[in-house]
Image: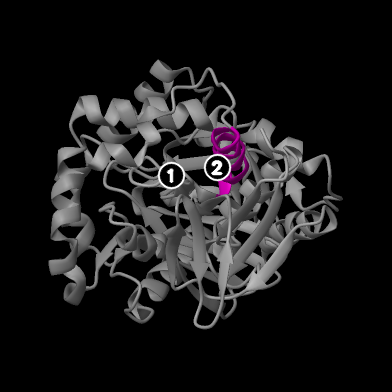
Amino acid sequence: MNNKLKIGIIGAGIQGISNALFLQKKGLDVTIFDRDEPGSPAASYGNAGHFSPYASLSLNRTDVLADVPAMLLSSTGPLALKWNYVPKMIPWFIKFIMNTKKDKMMHTAKYMHQILDLALPAYDELFSEVQLDGLVENKGILYIWNHKDLKSRELEIRVREELGVKQQLVNKKEIQDLEPNIKHFYHAGVYYPYARHTRNPKKILLKFFELFLKKGGKFKKLNIKEVKFDNENPIFKTETEEFKFDKIVIACGAFSKKLTDNLGEKIPLDTERGYHVHFKNCDHLLSRPVIFSNRGFGITPMEQGLRVVGTVEFGGLENPLSKSRIKNLINNAKYMLGDLPEHEDEWLGFRPTLPDFLPVMGPSKNHKNVFYCFGHHHLGWTLGPISGKIVSGMIVEENTNLNLSPYSSQRFS
C-alpha cells in the first residue's frame, strides 16, 4: 500500500489524536482539524481521568429501567432530563430500552470487554514515547456502595466474573484502610488494583499532541462544515477552503452526528451531559478515584484539587449548564468527605452515546474512504488509544483476530 496516504481527521480529542499517532506509526501523512485548540474544555479535558479496563458493563442493563423513575425524582441521583429535549430523545430512548434485554446487555459487555482488555497496553505504547512526569498513578480505582440496590451490585459482580474481569471485593474495614477520610456510610465495595488514573487528562492529551506534531503531523484550527467527494476521495469543506484526502476519520465525539447525517447515514448518536467541579487543595483527602455506585458520582484526586464528576443528563448540545446538577455534585462530595471549601471550575461536557452503549468504529456505510471513531460514552478516555489502534489498522487494511463487526455503523441500518 502506498505509504504516503494522506489522512484527514476531524476532532483533536483523545480519539482523534490517538488515531493520528497510530496512523503515523504506519507511515501515513496526517492532518487533524478541530474548531478549538487541543485540550480545550471538551470531554477529553473534563473527564474523570480514569483508565478503567474493568468497565465492560454499560448503562444498558436489565436492572436500569426499574430504577429510572426513582433516579429522575431524586435530587441526589445520577440521572436528569432537560424537559425541552425529551421529544428529541424519544427515538433514542426506545432503542435504548430494546438494548436492556439480557442478551443485548451481554453482547455489549462482551464487546466492551474485548477492547477494554487491550486498553492499557495501547496507552503504554503511546506512553513509552512521552515524558509522563508523574501524571499517571497506579493506585487502582475503588467503588463503594450501601445496602440499597444490592441486586444491581450483584449483577455487576456476576457479569464481570463471567467475562473474566479481575475484581477484588472489599469489606468496610478494607475500604477504611484504603481511604480513611471517607465517611462511613458504605457497606461494601469492589477494588480494581490494576486500574489507573491521571492527575491531569488535559496535560496527557497535550503531550500526545506535541508528539504528533514532532512526528510531522499538521493541525488546522478550522471548523469542518461538510464532507464532499471527488470520485471516492473525501474533501473537507470549511467556510472558505477545501482540503482533499485519500481517507478521513470522523472522531469529534458528540458533534459527529451532524457530519454522519450529512453523509446520509442515520446513526442514533446522542449526548449524555456530564459535569465536574473542583475542590482546590483537597487532593490529599483521597489516594485514588472513588466512585459511590448508588449515587452515580465519583471523585478523583488531581492537580487541580479533588475533581468531582458524574451525573448523566439528557439535554442535547444546546441547553445551558444546569445549576441543580452542579449542586448535586457538591452535596454528594460533602456526603462522602464532610466539610469542603468553596467549589470552583463548574464544567459541562458531552459524552457521545449510542443506545446500545458500544462505540462506532470502522468504515462508513456509504463511503469506503470515510472511517468513524466515536460514541465511547463514559469510556472515551480509557478507550482512546485502543480505538485509534483499531481504526488505523482498518484504514491500512491490516488483518486482525478481533471481531470488529459489533462496532460497525451498519448495525443501525
Asked whether residue 393 is drawn in magenta, I would say: yes
Asked whether residue 5 is drawn in magenta, I would say: no
Q: Amino acid at mark 1?
A: Tyr
**On the rendered image, what quadrant is the C terminus found in?**
top left
Disc number for residue 232: none
Label 2 secondary element: helix
Q: Which residue is mark 1?
A: 186
> Residue 259, relative to residue 115: is it above or below?
below
Q: Which residue is mark 2?
A: 383
Please name whichever residue, 73 or 378, is drawn nearer the observer in this view of the structure. 378
Please name whichever residue, 75 or 388, is drawn nearer the observer in this view of the structure. 388
Position in image of residue 208 (x %, y %): 74, 54
Position in image of residue 201 (x %, y %): 66, 58
Position in image of residue 118 (x %, y %): 59, 29
- Residue 288 in view: no
Q: Which residues are magenta?
A: 381-396
Front tag of 2 and 1? 2
The residue at 51%/62% (across/down) is 235
Q: Amino acid at mark 2?
A: Leu
Residue 365 picture quarter:
top left
Mark 1 residue crowding within 10 angstroms, few (<14) / some (14–19) / many (20+): some
Position in image of residue 37 (x %, y %): 65, 73
Q: CA distance from mark 2 to mark 1?
A: 30 Å
Determine contact: label 2, label 1, CB under 8 Å.
no
> Residue 175, relative to residue 168: is it above or below?
below
Please name whichever residue, 51 or 19, is drawn nearer the observer in this view of the structure. 19
Label 1 secondary element: loop
Secondary structure mostly seen in magenta is: helix
